[in-house]
Amino acid sequence: MTIDSRICQGPLIVRVSHADNQLVIFLNGAVVYDKRTEGDPQFSDTVELTNQLTPGINLLTLVGVDWGGRANFVGNIEIGNDNIPFSFRVDGTPVQAGMIWHTSYRILRN
């Protein structure tokens, strides 16, 4: 697994617009967001995490879970001045239920 490393001098914000079926976000092992949906609705969630960063290395992990069928996870992560989009979609052939996607960022906070 590759973990992207970033230095965060400014805010840490995650914006989510699709989480079919479930998107869980962890910061340093603690659940900071858990959205469950069916039918792939579009929405606009903002998760402000700046005040939860600790000095030194922080680990932000996004985990996509599907309950069977199609899957769609879309949003972006703002780490300081960097805006990093994320997107994972499965159309057509249904996937097996369970964790089907994840991404992590090592975030250094001074």
Image (spheres, helix red, strand yellow):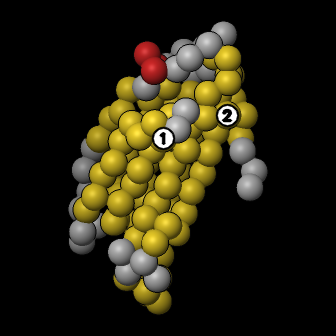
As helix, strand or loop, the secondary structure at mark 1 comes to: strand
User: Where 22 sits versus 57, above or below?
Assistant: below
Residue closest to the eye, 55 or 92: 55
Q: In the rendered view, does 50 fall on the left or right side of 83?
A: left
| Residue located at (52% from left, 38% from top) | 29
Give the quadrant of residue 72.
bottom left
For label 2, the crowd category at 10 Å Cα-Cα, with few meaning under 14, some 14 to 19 and many 20 or more, is: some
User: Where 28 sits versus 22, above or below?
Assistant: above
In which quadrant of the rendered image does the N terminus lie? bottom right
Give the quadrant of residue 40.
bottom left
Q: Position of residue 16 (x, y in %)?
A: 37, 46
Alpha-carbon span between mark 1 and mark 2: 12 Å
Q: Position of residue 36 (x, y in %)?
A: 28, 58
| Residue located at (39% from left, 54% from top) | 23
Whether residue 77 is visible: no
Look at mark 2 in the image and give the residue it sits on.
106
